[in-house]
Amino acid sequence: AVESLVVTREVATHCPYCALQCGMTLRAAPEGRVEVAARQFPTNRGGLCQKGWTAADLLDHPDRLTTPLVRDGGELRPATWAEALDRVTEGILATQSAHGRDAVAVFGGGGLTNEKAYALGKFARVALRTKNIDYNGRFCMSSAAAAGMRAFGLDRGLPFPLADIGQADTLVLVGANVAETMPPFARYLTEQKARGGTLIVIDPRATATARQATLHLQPTPGTDLALANALLHIVLGEGWADEAYIEGRTTGFDEVRRTVASYWPARVERLTGVPVADLEAAAHALASAQTAIILTARGAEQHSKGVDTVTAFINLALALGLPGRPGSGYGCLTGQGNGQGGREHGQKADQLPGYRKIDDPAARAHVASVWGVDPDDLPGPGPSAYELLTGDEMRTLLVFGSNPVVSAPRAARVEARLRDLDMLVVSDFVLSETAAIADVVLPTAQWAEEDGTMTNLEGRVLRRHALRQPPPDVRTDLAVIAELASRLGAGKWFTTEPQAVFEELRRASAGGTADYAGVTWERVDAEDGVFWPCPSVDRPGTPRLFLDTFATPDGRARFLPVEHRPAAEEVDAEYPLYLTTGRVLAQYQSGAQTRRIEALRRAAPNAFVELHPDLAARIGVGAGDEVVVTSRRGEMRAPARLTETIRPDTLFAPFHWGGAARANSLTSDALDPTSRMPEFKVCAVKVRAA
Ligand code: SF4
């Protein structure tokens, strides 16, 4: 039966997980088994991590959902598609008739293909006509996106190809543990080191990445902004700034110069715990390099001041004349597989396709004309992810490709709100923690069973190719969206065919910031991907941005003064320790997929709490003993892992597990005022032996 699903014996495609989107080959082996092989592709150069190697293990996994489920008498039971979709449609109509259109909300994911992200945004605005749609990318890198937009007028994770990273004389990684999150990336670090380059890692933990660094700066969690301002202070004091670049290509420098004047190194040493000598060495390594790249990731961004923290590093890069200089620049390492494309096509609360602002009349008119609707009928911007998930307006929620019960901040509050809904619908291929509390669960196709495109961390549009069909009672998300739209009387606007969706997406994005008008599936296959913006089929894509001009109205990059401020929740006598969260090599995001894969479970079987041996001794805990970590929002329990490489005032917990080991039971729901990114990376906790 499984063999009968095969549509072709072999396809070139990409890993379903992270934003590196490693190239891989899928082969249909005898009896329908699917084999994964690494593929030479410009991003991964033949490498895959253990998550990629084992990705096919979920295709025929016993936990795979193969039929819709509906809740009856408190239990989920199998149902036909007709019954499940009837229940969803009736629930939507009942909610909207009783409470208005905005009472139905949609929550998307950064792992959905471009086609699905586009169709979902359109479904919310055209079929449901609700303003309430956002996605889990809000939790991922929205702060870097907002900072990039305001400094450069454009947000593309890396404005240059990955290959440039291996060529940088000095590379700075801020809150990025690439050795664990995207191991094939380590090739660029090896290449950079082999050329005699300097690697500076800024991270409170001595991660696997930090251990490879020439210089590791280990700041107190939540103080990266001050550290960046101090580096700029030193650069200016030493006369190392690129004055010609500042004069010719930027605005706003004088105010930044005044702001960083007070970030003298001795003051910042007290604030961050990073010695003055290390600050000076880092500034010198950056300023003396012919080519230098600064990259931020979640460690710098997931803060209530994440946008300003990224801005501080962009200010530093601008003062050194890096953005737009070949081989140099600032970039953000996007996390989720389609974290980049996922935020470009309209599943974000404030955006329409092409990275257009939903409150811009011209943008609304353009997209409405492509969709064939009245622009006045398009809803306005809605609340951000956490505000959506915890607000009072939502009575029914449709979740596609996300597991917020594990991945949202202050997760117990989110879970309680989801349990309290009139109806929760989850589209997924396993019974995630969120699906397990749903009223209706719709089983969807996996990555090896669908065609489409993803956009990786470089802004390179990639093709996903189907090797086989989904199992008989499983449908694609596009089919679910089209069927629901049809039942809601909006069927004429939707199709189940991904290439037709992409063709419409091209038209909708034309002229926007993320312009895909010249990208075709055929070109993507023929050219190892196409970098946006690509406004017409007779023009190449754009691997390097900002060479001559920035995407701001005057073509200049904007310096913006930013000040350090404490985390929303500082340590005190009652909660004397910092908690920071992150990922481990063998697990991915909420773990709903990777925790089910035997080889990955063996490699990373359970959650843990990392703490310094001095702290462990103080509370009478040995390695492997269970500890209870408590914040003002909840508690988690997990075995202690002792390491000298963490600050004695800081705990680390991975966020891949639910239940009692859910790290997000502790995290803070303080939001960045601009990006609405929650402060995942620092909160105050206490710890004791269980
Ligand atoms: Fe997949 Fe990312 Fe691992 Fe590459 S690094 S194999 S894209 S999870």
Image (spheres, rainbow, N blue to C red):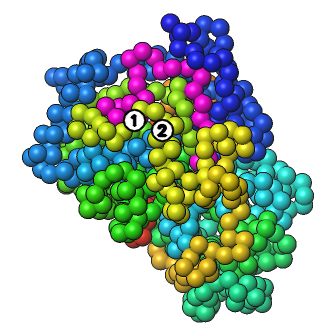
Classify residue 537 as left or right of residue 570.
Answer: right
Whether 146 is among the magenta residues is no
**Which quadrant: the C terminus?**
top left
Q: In the current view of this chain or complex, which residue is farthest to the right?
A: 195
Query: Label 1 belongs to which residue?
Result: 495
Q: What stretch is highlighted in magenta?
A: 455-483
Q: In this orientation, which residue lies closer to the viewer: 95 or 498? A: 498
Q: In this orientation, which residue lies closer to the viewer: 196 or 565? A: 196
- Residue visible at 66% across and 43% down in the picture: 524
CB contact under 8 Å: marks 1 and 2? yes
- Residue visible at 47% across and 77% down in the picture: 565
Q: Is residue 456 visible in this depiction of the protein?
A: no
Label 2 environment density (alpha carbons within 10 Å; few <14, some 14–19, many ≥20): few
Q: Is residue 502 visible in this depiction of the protein?
A: yes
- What amino acid does circle 1 point to? Thr
> Does the Cβ of the disc 1 residue fall within 8 Å of ligand 1?
no
* Residue 534 to residue 627: above or below: below
Q: In this orientation, which residue lies closer to the viewer: 393 or 575? A: 393
Query: Label 2 belongs to which residue?
Result: 500
The quarter of the picture where residue 92 lies is top left
Classify residue 664 as left or right of residue 606.
Answer: left
The quarter of the picture where residue 288 lies is bottom right
x, y percent for residue 567: 45, 69
Q: In this orientation, which residue lies closer to the viewer: 462 or 202? A: 462
Tell me the distance, in whole angstroms, between the alpha carbons under discs 1 and 2.
7 Å
The quarter of the picture where residue 407 lies is top left
* Residue 324 to residue 684: above or below: below
Q: Earlier in the sequence, mark 1 or mark 2?
A: 1
